[in-house]
Image (cartoon, helix red, strand yellow):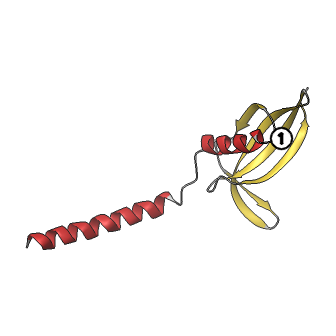
Amino acid sequence: MNWKKSLCALGVGAAIGYTIKTHLTQLPIRPEQALKLAKQMFKEKGAVSGSWIYMKPEKIELHDLEYTIYRGGITRTINEVNTQYEFFVDAYTGTIVATEETSPAV
């Protein structure tokens, strides 16, 4: 009788664990984590002197595909000139889906 209870508890625990894992993979990453990933990518090409990110995800359409993204910005120093970039980070994967140079900072 004891082994039946153990087997039942194991099955229930596995089902709950699977449900929680499935639910957690469908949540967006934290905006701070998205900014950290973007800064790492920009640092590969030069120094980053400033950054920001909107805390709420938004939906955009790029190349006929819809993304849930975080919008942010980076200021890089290139040849002693500050240059600003805007970027879009996929809110679920952390992948940068688009960047754009906005204007040189004064």
In the image, is 101 to the left or to the right of 73?
A: right
Label 1, residues with CA under 10 Å away: few <14, some 14-19, many ≥20? some
**In the rendered image, the vertical position of residue 71 relative to residue 11, given as above or below:** above
- Image quarter for residue 103? top right
Q: Is residue 8 left or right of residue 55?
A: left
Q: Residue at the spot x=82%, y=65% of the render?
A: 63
**SS of the residue under disc 1:** strand
Q: Residue at x 65, y 40 (%)?
A: 36
- Place of residue 101 in the rendered image (x, y in percent of width and height, measured from the top left): 88, 43
Q: Quadrant of residue 60?
A: bottom right
Across and down, in percent, residue 47 comes to 79, 33
Front-most of residues 75 and 102: 75
Q: Amino acid at mark 1?
A: Tyr
Q: What residue did someone put label 1 on?
A: 85
Q: Residue at x 36, y 62 (%)?
A: 17
Give the image location of residue 74, x and y in percent. Answer: 78, 37
Q: Is residue 53 above or below residue 7?
A: above
Residue at x-position 7% and y-position 73%? 1
